[in-house]
Structures are given as structure tokens and as C-alpha cells.
Image: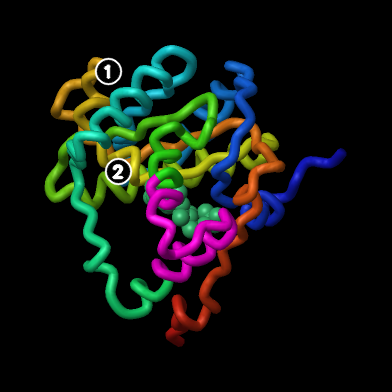
């Protein structure tokens, strides 16, 4: 089999939320991290601090997040506000939710099933590994957060190129305090989001949710 082209990798990557329990070979994980380390950053500052959880630490972090969720003890380092997504962004956000819940076969008013799907985030959707992406506080954080985004996309494309899958999860960032506590991380490091990753369970209902993209004209303007 020939290696996938760059276009193949970019176009086949998608967020997968059904994983096999099969662990990824540590050498593969090392390779993914080496790839992601090549991400560009402002002034080459490379501000990412990445914590990979597997095995017992994965269990412990998941349990701590679920326990905090039961108490509604959210501790995000960065705000999230659904209502801040207005206009076309709000429409796209709603479309994403609709497509996702339809793929899972969950009705709009089925609160119990929606809560379960939400909590599955905190179980890493069954993935055997997760990467927690931490960053130092620098100014208003926007520049450093953009570097972390560069890192995350490189990480995700590396997964795809190796026949693996992942899903970035802001929800994992809603429980920064318990994650820091379990992993022994100081409060000066801020949690932006996490990425669950591993092998895809193709039997999963939502394993193949394909999210469309807006036409280029909605995003790009050419100026001569
Ligand atoms: C920074 C970031 C945070 C995200 N957070 C979540 C999340 O908490 N839970 C989730 O199921 N998906 C999450 N997603 C996945 C998006 O829903 C997904 O990327 C988007 O719908 C486009 O689909 P695709 O990744 O399959 O192309 C996140 C994506 C990004 C980039």
C-alpha cells in the first residue's frame, strides 16, 4: 500500500468518538509527538506542555472528572459561552449538534441520552489514550492558544497518517482542577483542551459522522 498523500490525510481526518480499547504502540505515540513538536509557534516559543494519560492515570483522571461533573464542579481555565456564538457561527454550531445527535440516534428532547453522550467525553469515548494540552499564562493568552491550535492539528494529522484517529475536546478543559490534581501539575499551567486518541471502532454509530464545511466564498476574499 502506498503512503497517503497530504490531501488524503487532510480530507480523511475527522473527529472520531468511538475507539477500540487496543493500546497504541509507545513508539507510534513517540512518532506522533515528534511530528507535533514540529508545529510552528510565535517566535518558536513552543509553549505547549503535553500530558499523555494511558492505563491507570487515564482511569484516575476520568474518574476525577466524572466525580466533579456529578457535583457540577466545573473549573475551566478559559471561558466557554454558547450564547457568544451568534449569527452564522451560531447556525453552524447548531448544525454540528444536530448532525452529531442524529448520527447517534438521539432525539432533541431525550435529555438522558444527551447527558450520557456528554459524559462519554469524560470517558475519552473509550479511547485508551488522551493528550491534555496545557499552556503557560502569557498576556491575554490568545497568541499562545493559537500555538496550541497549531500543535493540535499537527498531532491530529499525524494520527490520521498513521491509521489512527482522535477527537479534540474542549469539554476535557472544563475540569482543569481535578486534571491538575491527579497529574500533579501546578496551577500556573492552564488547560486549553484535550485530545482522545487510538484506533477507531468502526462499528460505532457515530464513528462516521461527516461534518460539512462552508463554501470557500464564506471564508476567503481575494484582494488584487
Ligand atoms: C478545539 C476543539 C474543541 C472541540 N471540543 C469538542 C468536544 O468537547 N467534544 C466533542 O465531541 N467534539 C469536540 N470538537 C470536535 C468538533 O466538533 C469537530 O472538530 C467539528 O465538528 C468538525 O468535525 P471534524 O473534526 O470531524 O471535521 C472540538 C474541536 C476542536 C477543534
Q: Is residue 40 visible?
A: no
Give how far across and how far down residue 6 sits, in percent.
Answer: 67, 51
**The C terminus, quarter of image:** bottom left
Between the C-alphas of marks 1 and 2, the distance is 32 Å
Q: Label 2's element?
A: helix
- Residue 101 included in the magenta stretch of the image: yes
Give how far across and how far down residue 62 sits, in percent.
Answer: 37, 26
Left of 85 or right of it: where is 116?
right
Q: Is residue 142 visible?
A: yes
Return the residue nearer the eye: 139 or 185: 185
Q: Residue furthest right?
A: 1
Give how far across and how far down residue 189 sits, in percent.
Answer: 20, 30
Residue underneath mark 1: 182
**The N terminus, quarter of image:** top right
Can you tell which mark lies on residue 125?
A: none
Residue underneath mark 2: 43
The residue that appears at 14% across and 29% down in the rendered structure is 188
The residue that appears at 30% across and 46% down in the rendered structure is 42
Q: Magenta span covers which residues?
A: 93-115
- Residue 168's image quarter? top left
Amino acid at each position: 500500500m502506498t503512503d497517503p498523500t497530504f490531501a488524503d490525510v487532510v480530507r480523511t481526518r475527522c473527529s472520531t468518538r468511538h475507539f477500540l480499547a487496543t493500546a497504541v504502540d509507545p513508539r507510534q505515540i513517540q512518532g506522533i509527538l515528534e511530528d507535533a513538536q514540529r508545529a510552528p509557534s510565535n517566535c518558536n516559543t513552543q509553549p505547549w506542555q503535553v500530558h499523555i494519560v494511558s492505563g491507570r492515570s487515564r482511569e484516575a483522571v476520568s474518574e476525577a472528572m466524572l466525580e466533579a461533573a456529578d457535583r457540577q464542579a466545573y473549573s475551566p481555565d478559559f471561558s466557554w459561552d454558547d450564547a457568544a456564538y451568534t449569527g452564522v457561527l451560531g447556525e453552524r454550531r447548531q448544525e454540528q449538534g444536530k448532525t452529531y445527535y442524529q448520527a447517534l440516534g438521539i432525539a432533541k428532547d431525550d435529555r438522558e441520552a444527551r447527558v450520557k453522550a456528554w459524559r462519554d467525553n469524560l470517558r475519552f469515548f473509550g479511547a485508551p489514550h488522551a493528550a491534555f494540552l496545557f499552556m503557560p499564562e502569557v498576556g491575554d493568552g490568545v497568541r499562545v492558544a493559537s500555538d496550541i491550535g497549531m500543535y493540535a492539528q499537527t498531532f491530529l494529522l499525524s494520527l490520521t497518517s498513521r491509521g489512527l484517529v482522535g477527537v479534540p475536546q474542549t469539554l476535557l478543559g472544563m475540569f482543569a482542577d481535578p486534571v491538575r490534581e491527579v497529574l500533579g501539575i501546578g496551577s500556573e499551567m492552564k488547560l486549553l483542551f484535550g485530545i482522545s486518541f487510538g484506533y477507531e471502532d468502526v462499528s460505532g454509530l457515530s464513528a462516521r459522522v461527516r461534518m460539512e464545511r462552508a463554501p470557500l466564498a464564506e471564508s476567503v476574499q481575494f484582494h488584487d
